[in-house]
Amino acid sequence: MRKGFDGLCGIVDSELGRVATSGEVFIFVNRRRTQLKMLRWEPGGFILYHKRLESGTFPIPKKVSSGSIFWADLVLMIEGIQILKSRRRKRFNLQQ
């Protein structure tokens, strides 16, 4: 978790094959799942969010087929809430 803006942009471009300036939020979690960084581009520059847990770990949600996660799952992950059994109901999605 030593990487800053440039290092994380390099990972997004080279390893993920995505464009860091697309406006997507890229999430990075360390192996022990005690630190989380989120990288996002907005007009004018990058934003880097960093959260370090003093106790506990981040639960890793299931990925969607595109390799992304839902916004609600991200919020639950950051807040430390893990739902053991749930069902996502079908909703209209313009991007399908």
Image (cartoon, grey):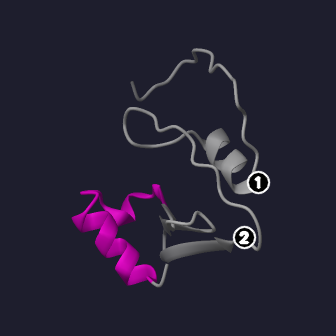
What residue appears at the point 47 percent right and 84 percent down from the top-left corner?
2
Range of residues picked out in magenta = 3-27
Residue 23 vs 54, above or below: the answer is above
Say which of 85 and 22 sits in front.
85
What residue appears at the point 43 percent right and 82 percent down from the top-left corner?
3
In this rendering, would 52 be left or right of 45? Answer: right
Disc assigned to residue 79 = 1
Residue 24 vs 32, above or below: the answer is above
Asked where in the image residue 17 lies, by quadrant, the reply is bottom left
What residue appears at the point 30 percent right and 74 percent down from the top-left corner?
10
Say which of 90 and 82 sits in front.
82
Q: CA distance from mark 2 to mark 1?
A: 11 Å
Residue 47 vs 38, above or below: the answer is below
Name the residue furthest top.
Answer: 90
In this rendering, would 53 be left or right of 40? Answer: right
Q: Position of residue 56 (x, y in %)?
A: 74, 62
In this rendering, would 91 be left or right of 51? Answer: left
Is 16 colored magenta in this rendering?
yes
Q: Position of residue 77 (x, y in %)?
A: 67, 50
In this rendering, would 42 be left or right of 57? Answer: left
Say which of 90 and 54 sits in front.
54
Tell me which numbered mark, 2 or 1, is placed earlier along the sequence: 2
Q: Are marks 2 and 1 in contact (CB under 8 Å)?
A: no
Q: Residues within 10 Å of mark 2 (few under 14, many from 20)?
A: few
What residue appears at the point 48 percent right and 69 percent down from the top-left corner?
43
Say which of 81 and 41 sits in front.
81
Q: Position of residue 7 (x, y in %)?
A: 36, 80
Task: Provide the residue designation for mark 2.
Answer: 53
Is 83 colored magenta in this rendering?
no
* Residue type of the residue flagged with mark 2: Leu
Q: Position of residue 37 (x, y in %)?
A: 55, 69
